[in-house]
Image (cartoon, rainbow, N blue to C red):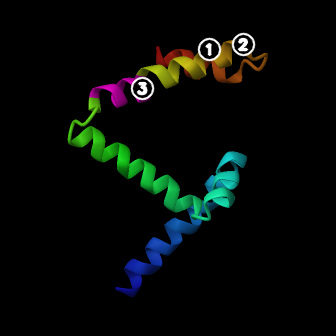
Amino acid sequence: MDEFLNRINYYNVQLDKELSKYPHMRKLEQYTSVPKTYLAVGVAAFLFLMIFFNILGELLSDIIGWLYPAYVSFKAIENKNYANDAQLLTYW
């Protein structure tokens, strides 16, 4: 059991390091007083359950798989940095 808890703690620390790179996540953590790792895992679990039980699953799948990449692609095209363009436009 200790090995399992140590592994969970390790992944929690790694996720916290990754999420700390995003200022919006730090602000959200301060605003809600909920650790950002719990927020991220909670949102991911919520989306998974909504899609798995097909509660607005088609809409969520469209947003995740089409609308968000389209938005990011348009933002990349407008940006002067062309490093992201090839990767994002390859998606299409």
Which residue is found at the position 36% from the left and 43% from the top? 47
In depth, the one of 48 and 76 nearer the eye is 48
Magenta stretch holds residue 21: no
Label 2 residue SS: helix
Q: Position of residue 62 (x, y in %)?
A: 37, 23
Give whichever of 13, 3 is nearer the camera: 13
Picture coordinates of residue 43 (x, y %)?
44, 49
Tell me the CA gap for discs 3 and 2.
Answer: 21 Å
CA gap, disc 1 to disc 2?
6 Å
- Label 3 environment density (alpha carbons within 10 Å; few <14, some 14–19, many ≥20): few
Q: Main secondary structure of the magenta part?
A: helix
User: Circle 2 sits on which residue?
Assistant: 78
Is residue 6 left or right of 17 when viewed as pictured?
left
Three-letter amino acid code at the position of disc 1: Phe
Q: Do callouts 1 and 2 mark residues in contact (Cβ within 8 Å)?
A: yes
| Residue of label 1 | 74
Magenta span: 58-65
Task: Tell which circle, 1 or 3, labels the residue nearer the N-terminal end.
Answer: 3
Q: Residue at x 50, y 25 (%)?
A: 68
The amino acid type of the residue labelled 2 equals Glu
Q: Residue at the spot x=70%, y=23% of the render?
A: 83
**Few, some or many residues within 10 Å of mark 2 (<14, 14–19, 20+):** few
**Residue at coordinates 61% horizontally, 17% vertically from top-left?**
86
The amino acid type of the residue labelled 3 equals Ile
